[in-house]
Amino acid sequence: MYRSTFLLLHLFIIITVFTSLFSGLRIATVTHDSFLLLSPILPEGRVHFWHMLSACTLTILSFSYLIYRKKNKSPPTGSKYHIFINQFGYLVFVASLITGWCVYFNLTQFNAHTIHLISALLIIAYLILHSWVYVIQYGKKLIKRLLFIPKRQFPWVCLLALLLATPLFFYLTLHNQTFLQVTSLKPQTLMEVDGLDTEEAWQNTPSIKVHTIGGANFIDGQTTVTIKALHNQHETFFLFKWQDPTHSLAHLPLEKTQDGWKVKENGFVNFDERKHYEDKFAVMLSHTCGNGADGTTHLGKKPLDNKPNNWHGKGYHASVDGNIRDLWHWKAVRTNDMVLADDNFIGPPAQPLHGQRRYSAGYLPDGKESGAYVMNWQWYSQTGVIPKRLPDTLTTPNQVLPWFGSSAYQSAKDNYPIGSQIPSVLYRSNRFEGDRADVRARGHWKDGVWTLELVRKNQTSSDHDVALQNGICMWVSAFDHSQIAHTRHNAAIALRYSL
């Protein structure tokens, strides 16, 4: 019976480990470009679900194996080589499990995500070192030894325990949340959305800290976000603070060269700019609180059936369960002077449009009545562009280019010297109007810290907004002069409104 139990655990561990490794390596491609070389053999789609399920299963199997070893106290057998390799395997498996759960439960300040990745790579080494002797010794017979257990010896009790414990543990894990207390404001309290936390109400309200990881350009790819929230009868106010050592406002500036104007970029051609870009911050809201950004993250080059590939090979955001997720996208150059965040949403994958260079799947803007910013080039090419408008006087490229104060491009009047830089963001008006302007926002950077205030009505008339109320879940992401390479966290933040 002990041997059949061992074989069952061994078989389940093999399946679970390979599921965990392949899904984990796909997740790693988001932050580590070198792993994109493995993309053809890695799974695509909602791999966070499978990675989480395999993590829960592997944890249950590990405890089951400890119980098995406690009951079966026979000394270890095999050569010194196998004993050493097995001890090495135990070490890296334990390291992988501990650091994986640290990442999930937001205990990542000690670079748990890096140790988790290293331990996963060491598991691959262990699998090779552990299995090659058995493959040589048994050949095809090894498959039979692993897969076939005599019916009279089958450990049915062990199997039943695993089938009951794993789904229960998985369910409990998915419902792990951090709670944010939304403090009630006094009726006479007035709040100014200025990117500062000087009001007494902000000083007296409790905060939570969420450690986010995986972003480009941050120190070790991580930053801690401090969050506070206030509400009155009509609106909810949020305050976010995060460390960002660089005040990044150069958003794809246009530079005059001997061959004409070119966009200064280092990845924008694949929509993955990480150098010449503005700082940003995103907030997602949902009625549900699942992992993998509430099931909206679809990883891979073509993770959605019958939809285009993405340029960077990392994935899309889309909702495939029929629910809308609200997404507020604050941008230090494009929307900060509007005193707005771009009110977007994540919905079902959109139909591709003919001639559309960038397909964004389910990540779409709310509707607007008027107002917008556009890119200040007629048609993008990596080799050169023609500006739509030129500033009347040379200005810093870290600003937006207003419609008034600029003139339509004419080559005869293009007398800027080589090396000149002009803004790439062109305002056609000074702010959005309509649903897309539902979120007021203002950010302020000082001494390596961004402070961002956001406010929105608790109830709006938009079908693309999520009502702000008790139990709504939230996720946050910070961008340090990067287009898509943002930080992230796993466990949702559930809003708790004071009565």
Image (tube, grey):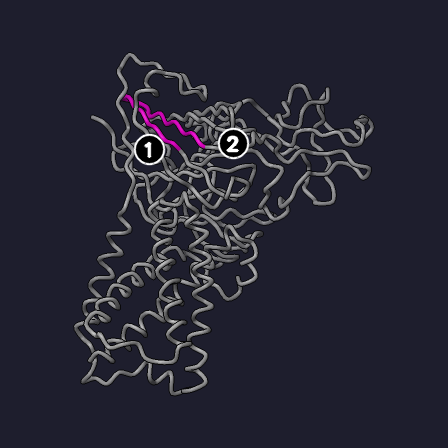
Question: Dot 1: within a 10 Å radius of its alpha carbon, few (fewer than 14), some, or many (20 or more) residues?
Answer: some
How far is the residue under mark 2 from the one under mark 1? Answer: 23 Å
Q: 10 Å neighbourhood of mark 2: few (<14), some, or many (≥20)?
A: many
Residue displayed at 45% across by 56% down: 117
Q: Is residue 3 visible?
A: yes
Q: In what element is the residue under mark 2?
A: strand
The residue that label 1 is drawn on is 208
Work out whether residue 20 or residue 117 is closer to the camera in this orientation and state it: 117
Please state which of the two labelled residues, at mark 2 or mark 1, is closer to the viewer: 1
Quarter of the view holding residue 183: top left
N-terminal-most mark, 2 or 1: 1
- Residue at left offset 62%, top offset 34%: 375
Left/right of residue 266 with respect to residue 146 in the rendered view: right
Please give the range of residues in magenta: 226-242
> Is 224 located above or below residue 114 in the figure?
above
In this view, the residue in front, 55 or 493, is 55
- Work out whether 148 lies above or below 173: below
- Tell me where residue 428 sits by quadrant: top right
For image coordinates 77% across by 32% down, the residue present is 419
x 34%, y 20%: residue: 203
Residue, disc 2: 331
